[in-house]
Image: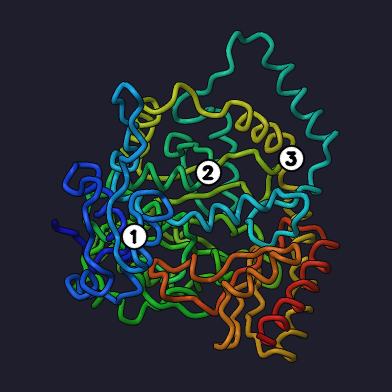
Amino acid sequence: MKISIDKNEKTPLYHQIHSSIKGLIAEGSMPDGYTLPSERVLASELGVHRNTVAKAYADLKAEGYIESRQGSSYRVCFNRGRRSSGGRKDVYWDSLLRKEFAGFAGDFDELYSKSFDKDLISFAGGVADREIYPPEEIAEVFENVLSRSREKAYFYTPYQGDPELRREIASFMATKGIKTDPGNIQVFSENNQALDFILNLMLTPGDGVLMDETMSADVYRTILLAGGKVIDVPADEHGILCDNLDIIIEKTRPKFIYVDSSFNNPKGTYLTVERKQRLLELSYRYRIPIIEEDEGSELYYDVERIPSIKSMDRGGNVIYMYSFSLTMVPGIGVSFVIADKRVIDKFSEMVSLRTASSDWASQMLMLEYMKNGIFNKRLEAFRRKYRKKRDMMCARLDVLAERYGIEYRKPSGGVYLWVRLPSRINARYLLREAQKRGMTFMPGYLFFSSKSKGRNYFRLNYSYPTEEGIEKGMDILEKSIAAVLRK
């Protein structure tokens, strides 16, 4: 029996042990009745802590693959009782799943989905305020869309996205200092989808992606699932630290530099113009493309609009991603990528292979809002509303800072607050207390590719909850912190 693990992989070791043993059971190398090594023996053989093996065995036991005997002895019992009277066996689905999916905990997705639980106050999701666009207005705008489409016998959009929408996007980008042609724009449903296409198009398994050490879980999971390696570097309140990046680049030779440049997720910080220029210089010097996500750039409160890296790019090295998810009707998914025409052409080919049509309804609704000028007016409404919510939440955090020693930095824009707890408080324990009382948030470890980091950090979102929800939720947060400290 050979149980394989790789200590250089990001997948937790107990997940690797768990998956390896399941694979051996599936292929018949460990038949029913096979006795596994004790926790101590296997831990010694693999060079890991005994608790790592214990966790793997506990999960295998809970899933019905093994059973324990006399407290510490384990043997395989997977096929017992799984055969029908005709000798049929169930498909062993876990063995068919790609190994890259092993160990991808669903904590982030589960907490995000709770944003829509009516019985729970959620500070977890990054979702647009649902009160900015009145329902009657949405109905009227959509009726206008349908009225103009009645002469058509179809509701399809071209693979690259609706041409008229791409023209409107090009005009919108001109207001952000980016001159582009509609032919250089590819429309997607969301930035996660766009990033997946970029990586599938250009990333070879084993390639590295250089990025901030704290990043949206969706981003680093997409990189890992594409077979890439996350090369994370430190950052401060002004974004990713650039002083020694040339040394890191020469040592690691990354395929891309990835940056969330404006009021990023999760910290709400933004890259200064000087650092953006420095990243662009490095991109030109080493011929490394920059993937720039710029979703939060229209949500500025205490500063002027910050120019993007793409607006400074004269060489075409930046692949620019933007999403309307924080400034459009919640659930209407429209994002886009601006890139070299050769890249855009390949995107369209990939879209044609994966789907018959992109989301016609969302694209047409977005087009109508942009054409009639309502979208630009709504941007100012979003800025006013989000700023007020941010100030409400920060006022309560100031009290918690004085009473309990939490630390945070008030962001100048965006929709996220990054909070540091005193070292004696683990954010996971705090989350459990908060959920008991009816509130949820995102614990900090979810934003590090290495789950050993971020234990006393957490992220709050203020775009989606109502003002009343913010007050109630912050009450719950204070009670939860007090409860954890009493234990």
- For badge 3, the amino acid type reads Gly
Looking at the rendered structure, the kind of residue marked 2 is Glu
The answer to whether residue 81 shows anywhere in this view is: yes
**What is the CA distance from the residue labelled 3 to the residue labelled 1?**
51 Å
Q: Residue at x 44, y 69 (%)?
A: 448
- Label for residue 332? none
Q: Quadrant of residue 282?
A: bottom left
**What is the secondary structure assignment of the residue under circle 1?**
helix
Residue 238: percent from the left, percent from the top? 51, 77
Mark 2 or 3, closer to the camera: 2
Mark 2–mark 3 distance (CA, rounded to whole Å): 22 Å
Using the image, tell me which numbered label, if any, was put on residue 190. 2
Q: Residue at x 38, y 25 (%)?
A: 352
Q: Is residue 210 left or right of residue 382?
A: left
Instruction: Bin the neighbour count of mark 2 within 10 Å (Cα to Cα): few under 14, some 14-19, many 20 and up.
Output: some
Say whether disc 2 or disc 3 marks the residue closer to the N-terminus.
2
In the picture, the quarter occupied by the C terminus is bottom right
Q: Does residue 209 sit above or below 83 in this rendering?
A: below
Q: Which residue is mark 1?
A: 15
Q: CA distance from mark 2 to mark 1?
A: 30 Å
- Where does the image place residue 155, in percent across and percent down from the top left? 59, 17
Q: For numbered disc 3, what is the local secondary structure? A: loop
| Displayed quadrant of residue 87 | top left
- Point out the residue furthest to the left here: 1
- The residue singled out by tag 3 in the image is 373
Residue mark closest to the camera, 3 vs 1: 1
